[in-house]
Every structure is written in C-alpha cells, then in structure tokens.
C-alpha cells in the first residue's frame, strides 16, 4: 500500500526574489529521484504540500505550468513558521513536495471559450501557471480571447514582472496590468484598483466567457458586483479557496466548507457552487 | 454462520493460546473507569464493564502516531529525507469491544479508505485487527444506538460476537477472521441451535429508551440548517467551553493535526488527534479565521455528524449512539436534542419541534 503522506524529495535549484519588499520568493525545485516528476503530473490550478523536515508542511499553489518540464515552481509569501524558514533556505538544500493535490481550473470546460483572468496581490501564482499553459503553442488555439487583469500595490510588488511585460507585447493576450499607485513617471500601464479596471476593460459576460478570480478577500468582494453588472452568470465565475490545510488529501478534516473538502473537492469552485455552501472561507 | 459455546472456565485458557499469535487488547479498569489497553502476558480483559470511558478508536488510530522519521545531520546521506519507520503489523485482537464501537470503524473507514487515497497507517492497523465483540446486555441511560444504525447486539462490523449467557458465552463466528481466531483459541464446541441469541437481543434492545429521529436529515436544506442560528445554534453553543472532550471521546471523530518534533539532530513527523472545537483548527497564517466563533465551531461538529456526512455518503449519521459525548460534556450539550432539533427544523417558521 502506498503511503499518501510521503513527500517526493526535491532539491532547491533556484530562488528568485519577486518583490521589492522581499516578502515573496519563487522556488524552483528539481526532483531527486528519476520518475518522480512523471508521477507529479499536474494541471494548472492544483497545489502541493511543501514539506520541510523539522518544520512541517504548507499547501502552496503550483506556479509553474504543466508545459514547463524538468522542474516545478512555487511562489511563497513569508508569513509564519514554515514560510519564514523556507525563505532562509538556500539553493542546493533538500526538502520535499507532496502532490499534486486538488482539482484544477476546469480546462475541459474552458476549451473554446474566452478566459478572463482577474488577479490581485500574490494570489497570482496558479494564474501564472494557467497563462503559461494557455499561451503554449500546443494550447493557444484551444481558447478564444484571453484577458488578464492583474493588480498589485505598486510596480515593485508585481509578481513575474519580466513575464508580464513580455506578455504585454503579444497580440494573442490582452494584458491589463495595474497598480494602486506609483510615482514612477515611466509607468505606462493602468493605475487603479482591480475592480475598477475590470469594469473598464473586461468583456461582457456571455455563454462563451469565463472569469477566473484570485486575490485578497477585499478585491473579490468588490469585483463580484462588477461581474454581476457585466452579466457574468455565477457558473462562469471561477474562484480558488485557501482554507487552512494539513493532509491535502481529504482525510484530516481541517479544510471543509459544508460537505466539501477544499483540498480535495476544490480548491477551485464556481461561484454558483460556493453559493450552495456555508461561507466558511 | 457457526455458533460456538465457550464455557466461562474455558475463556482464559483460550486467551492464553491466542496470546501466542495475537497482541491482545481488552477493557481494563483504571481508577473509576475502563480503558482499552494492550494486555500484558497473562493479564485478562475485565469483561464486567459497561463501556470504556474513551472509545476503542485509538487501537486502530492512536492519539499520537509517528508517520515519518528524519535526520537533520548534514553529514547523513538521508539528510532531511522523510522515511516511514519499520513497524510490525502483527495480528491483534480486541477482546470485548462493544458493538457500537465496532460499527464506528465502519463509519470512519469511509474517511480513511477512499477510491483516490488510502490512509496506509489506519488501514494497516485495521486490517491487522480481529474484532471480538461483547454484546451489550445492560445498555446505559445515554445510549441511543438502536436509532443510530447500530445496536447492543449489532454484528455488522465484528468478526466474532460473544454473548454472555449464564455460565458460558455464545460465540458467533461472523467472518473468516473470526473463525480463525476461534480455532487458534481452541474454542470448538458447537452451540445448540435455539432462540437464545434472538431473545437476549430483544431484551437488550428493549432496554434502550433513548432515541434520535434522523428521517428528515437528508431532505433538510444544508444551508437552511447552517443558518438556523436562532432556532438551534445560538442556544446550543452558549454554554460550550470548546474543551474538545466530545471529539476526543467519540469513536467516530477522526480529525488530526500533523506536527514535526525534533530532538537534537533527528526527529519525527507525527499526527495527533485534533478537534474542530478548537479555534486554531481553522485559523490562517494571516490571522483570518473562517470559524472564529464558538457558534461556528459547535455547529461544525453537529452539522458534520448529522448533515454533511449524511449527504456525502448516504449511509446515515456519523454517530453510533454510544452516548459518550452526552455523558462527558461538562455543560450537558446533548447530541440527541440537537439531532432532533435538526430533524424537525422548519425553515418556514424557523423553529424546531423540540424544546431546549
Ligand atoms: C490551496 C492553497 C494554496 C495556497 N497557495 C499559496 C501560494 O501560492 N503562495 C503562498 O505564499 N501561500 C499560499 N497559500 C497559503 C499558505 O499555505 C500559508 O501562508 C502557509 O501555510 C503559512 O504557513 P506558515 O507555517 O508560514 O504559517 P503559520 O501561521 O506558522 O502556520 C502554521 C501551519 O498552519 C497551517 N496554515 C496556516 N495558514 C494557512 C493558510 N492560509 N492556508 C493553509 N494552511 C495554513 C499550515 O499547516 C502551517 O504550516 C495557499 C494555501 C492554500 C490552502
Ligand atoms: S464536550 Fe461539551 S463543552 Fe466540551 S467542546 Fe464538546 S460540546 Fe463543548
Ligand atoms: S457523537 Fe457522541 S454519541 Fe455519537 S458516536 Fe460520538 S461520542 Fe458517541
Ligand atoms: S487538508 Fe486534510 S481534509 Fe483537507
């Protein structure tokens, strides 16, 4: 019998500081044992438990895309016990990852559709995975228009800045990057909060258009009425939850909202599904 | 099914034979209560008990269980790599488990043994265990097993059922595992085919006066029950001190936490029973707590047992009616009352047919 709690051993191959305040770093891992990468086959929107012996495990969304081979990436905000320790680790250090876990964004359903990605702050990780996945030459033709609205406090707080700028140059994706404010005279993108920018630039809702929203609760709270105004039906609004987790595989009981376990039945839900569950997230 | 007769005088000799191939676990008196404990060589289970204070769940699912070991010595070639410690899953038998506690394993199994993931720790322990039940002839005042898919003579999840009958036990060998155990113990005398079992069963069942109604739970609206704050949750939660006694004692509560413990340069990752009654159970690193109120936590425990589980598995409630939480709660929060409230809740009038 396989032990579902046993992490795959990995080595930290590369660490990138993402934001000017250094609170976010991206960790690139390679698997120590050949064959484990294949077993870890994942889809955009899934997450994994990062495991550090002596500290514990934390659930983190997978930031790399299934189309990127040879490694997996996670972007981690420094906040408590495990994340602070991780931020102090070095390239070459050994740790573990366990997964992939949870459902993913509904890629079958999204085929042939327009996808509007709305992200705020550091909840952009699985959205990056999704964008890289959709833009891959093998996949781009599977989707209609792709819109991205992504905001952060300031230019220095945007994740994956080089990639954002490169995407902004392309004609097969509509990038709408915004910051709450900046005194940088060179800043050539939007200024303003995500809900306001969404109202200006998002296409109206229809049977062929889906919105994926990830961000801080306050952003979600104010974006939802905007999407209602734009006529997005609740089964076309997709969200990803972050309940406290331990096992990640639906057994320890930590993450439920009603009868749903966020780790296994989620973390991705449509707003229509969430309307049927207690608001315990 | 084979039914055997074990003279009381034969019981101990049989257990001594079993000791050679099984680890034996049985009820043992400690201070003023009983506990299921591993029996020392020669030690006999004390079958004169009503039921143990805590359930027998810890035999399959220990309160603390080491999952992995690791070394934090950088010179070690296994540095920072988790490994499952070698462990013996030698056959073991629980002698004298009550039928309700055996039925609890069936309820809990749905959580640990799923199509997608198998909890190898729970399953290996469970599969190594033979359940020798002891029919419950004198159920307690807080027992309501007969209306909770169990019963004082429930055989659903046992390998052997022992029924005390004057100078002997009837031994009903319910599974192959049970037959093997009886053979190993040398219990081979076939019992006379008569109505003794049925009669004793009816007698015991008729002693259970306490009941819950569960017939409407499945058709009730989950959201309406969740939102029934004034009709149910506020009054029920007001006196709860979130001590976690109820979840700790319950045979069908299964939640756990995972922690790493390091001693010098090595350590273990272990899991420990946890409780949805504790505020830390759901708190995020940011401080946000989606179940930050006592009402929310009390509601979670009962909604889980009496609604979420019912809807998810369609196998009834997540409770065998063992009555432990009713007996042990320091402030008399009673699952029977709450169940009846939930069952009779009318969203139109926002009221229940049960007085608080
Ligand atoms: C599906 C999912 C995806 C996530 N993706 C990301 C991501 O991409 N990047 C990122 O920086 N963060 C992400 N988080 C949040 C991240 O898991 C927490 O910030 C992290 O667990 C905090 O751990 P800590 O030990 O530093 O904090 P402490 O407060 O010391 O937490 C101790 C333990 O509590 C648990 N815990 C605490 N907060 C959370 C939380 N918010 N969610 C789940 N468990 C928690 C963990 O088991 C943790 O080890 C995600 C959470 C979930 C559920
Ligand atoms: S035993 Fe009673 S007081 Fe303690 S947590 Fe359970 S319901 Fe609350
Ligand atoms: S909820 Fe109470 S009565 Fe039901 S099985 Fe658990 S402890 Fe026993
Ligand atoms: S994290 Fe354990 S059940 Fe979801």
Image (cartoon, helix red, strand yellow):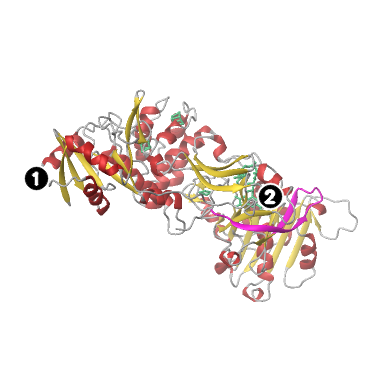
Of A104 and B3, nearer the camera is B3
The location of residue A1, given as percent across then percent down, is 44, 58
Q: Is residue A42 visible?
A: no
User: Which residue is at 74% across, 47% downward?
Assistant: A88
Name the dominant secondary structure of the magenta segment. Answer: strand
Q: Are marks 1 and 2 in contact (CB under 8 Å)?
A: no
Pointer 2 chain: B
Q: Earlier in the sequence, mark 1 or mark 2?
A: 2
Circle 1 or circle 2, nearest the eye? 2
Say yes or no: labels 1 and 2 on the same chain. Answer: yes
- Spatial CA distance of label 1 from label 2 is 68 Å
The location of residue A113, given as percent across then percent down, is 61, 70
User: Which residue is at 68% across, 46% downward?
Assistant: A83
Asked which secondary structure carries label 2, the reply is: loop
Of B16 and A259, nearer the camera is B16
The location of residue B92, given as percent across then percent down, is 34, 45
Pointer 1 chain: B
Q: Is residue B100 magenta?
A: no
Q: Quick check: B223 above or below A67?
A: above
The mark found on residue B192 in the picture is: 1
The mark found on residue B1 in the picture is: none
Q: Which residues are magenta?
A: A6-28
The mark found on residue B74 in the picture is: 2
User: Which residue is at 30% across, 30% downward?
Assistant: B142
């Amino acid at each position: 019998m396989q032990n579902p709690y046993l992490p795959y051993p990995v080595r930290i191959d590369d660490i990138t500081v993402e934001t000017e305040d250094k609170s976010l770093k991206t960790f690139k891992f390679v698997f120590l044992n050949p064959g484990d990468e294949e077993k870890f086959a994942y889809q955009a929107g899934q997450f994994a438990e990062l495991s550090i012996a002596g500290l514990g495990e934390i659930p983190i969304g997978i930031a790399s895309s299934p189309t990127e081979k040879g490694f997996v990436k996670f972007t981690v905000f420094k906040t408590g016990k495990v994340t602070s320790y991780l931020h102090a680790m070095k390239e070459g250090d050994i740790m573990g990852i366990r997964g992939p876990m949870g459902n993913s964004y509904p890629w079958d359903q999204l085929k042939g559709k327009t996808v509007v990605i709305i992200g705020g702050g550091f909840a952009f990780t699985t959205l990056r995975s999704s964008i890289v996945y959709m833009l891959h030459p093998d996949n781009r033709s599977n989707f209609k228009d792709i819109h991205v609205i992504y905001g952060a406090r300031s230019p220095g707080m945007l994740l994956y800045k080089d990639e954002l700028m490169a995407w902004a140059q392309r004609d097969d994706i509509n990038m709408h990057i915004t910051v709450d404010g900046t005194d940088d005279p060179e800043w050539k993108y939007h200024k303003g909060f995500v809900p306001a920018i969404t109202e200006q630039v998002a296409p109206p809702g229809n049977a062929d258009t889906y919105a994926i929203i990830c961000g801080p609760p306050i952003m979600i709270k104010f974006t939802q009425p905007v999407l209602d105004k734009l006529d997005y039906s609740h089964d076309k609004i997709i969200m990803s939850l972050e309940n406290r987790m331990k096992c990640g595989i639906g057994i320890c009981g930590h993450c439920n909202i009603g009868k749903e376990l966020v780790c296994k039945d989620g973390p991705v839900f449509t707003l229509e599904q969430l309307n049927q569950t207690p608001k315990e997230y | 099914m084979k039914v055997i007769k074990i003279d009381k005088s034969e019981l101990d000799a049989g257990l001594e034979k079993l000791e050679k191939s099984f680890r034996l676990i049985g009820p043992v008196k400690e201070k003023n209560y009983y506990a299921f404990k591993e029996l020392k060589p020669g030690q006999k289970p004390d079958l004169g008990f009503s039921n143990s204070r805590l359930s027998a769940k810890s035999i399959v699912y220990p309160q603390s269980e080491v999952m992995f070991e690791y070394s934090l010595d950088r010179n070690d070639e296994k540095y920072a790599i988790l490994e499952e410690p070698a462990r013996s899953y030698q056959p073991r038998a629980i002698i004298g488990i009550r039928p309700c506690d055996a039925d609890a394993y069936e309820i809990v199994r749905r959580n640990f043994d799923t199509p997608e993931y198998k909890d190898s720790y729970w399953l290996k322990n469970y599969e190594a265990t033979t359940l020798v039940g002891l029919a419950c002839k004198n159920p307690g005042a807080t027992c309501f097993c007969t209306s909770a898919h169990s019963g004082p003579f429930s055989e659903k999840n046992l390998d052997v059922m022992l029924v005390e009958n004057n100078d002997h036990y009837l031994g009903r060998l319910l599974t192959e595992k049970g037959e093997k155990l009886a053979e190993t113990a040398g219990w081979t005398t076939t019992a006379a085919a008569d109505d003794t079992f049925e009669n004793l069963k009816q007698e015991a069942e008729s002693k259970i006066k306490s009941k819950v109604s569960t017939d409407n739970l499945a058709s009730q609206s989950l959201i309406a029950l969740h939102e029934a704050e004034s009709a149910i949750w506020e009054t029920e939660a007001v006196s709860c001190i979130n001590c976690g006694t109820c979840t700790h004692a319950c045979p069908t509560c299964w939640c756990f936490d995972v922690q790493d413990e390091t001693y010098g340069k090595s350590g273990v990752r272990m899991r420990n029973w946890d409780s949805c009654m504790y505020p830390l159970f759901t708190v995020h690193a940011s401080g946000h707590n989606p179940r930050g109120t006592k009402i929310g936590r009390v509601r979670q425990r009962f909604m889980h047992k009496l609604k979420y589980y019912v809807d998810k598995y369609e196998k009834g409630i997540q409770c065998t009616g063992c009555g432990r939480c009713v007996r042990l709660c320091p402030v008399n929060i009673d699952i029977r009352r709450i169940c009846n409230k939930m069952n009779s809740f009318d969203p139109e009038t926002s009221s229940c047919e049960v007085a608080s």
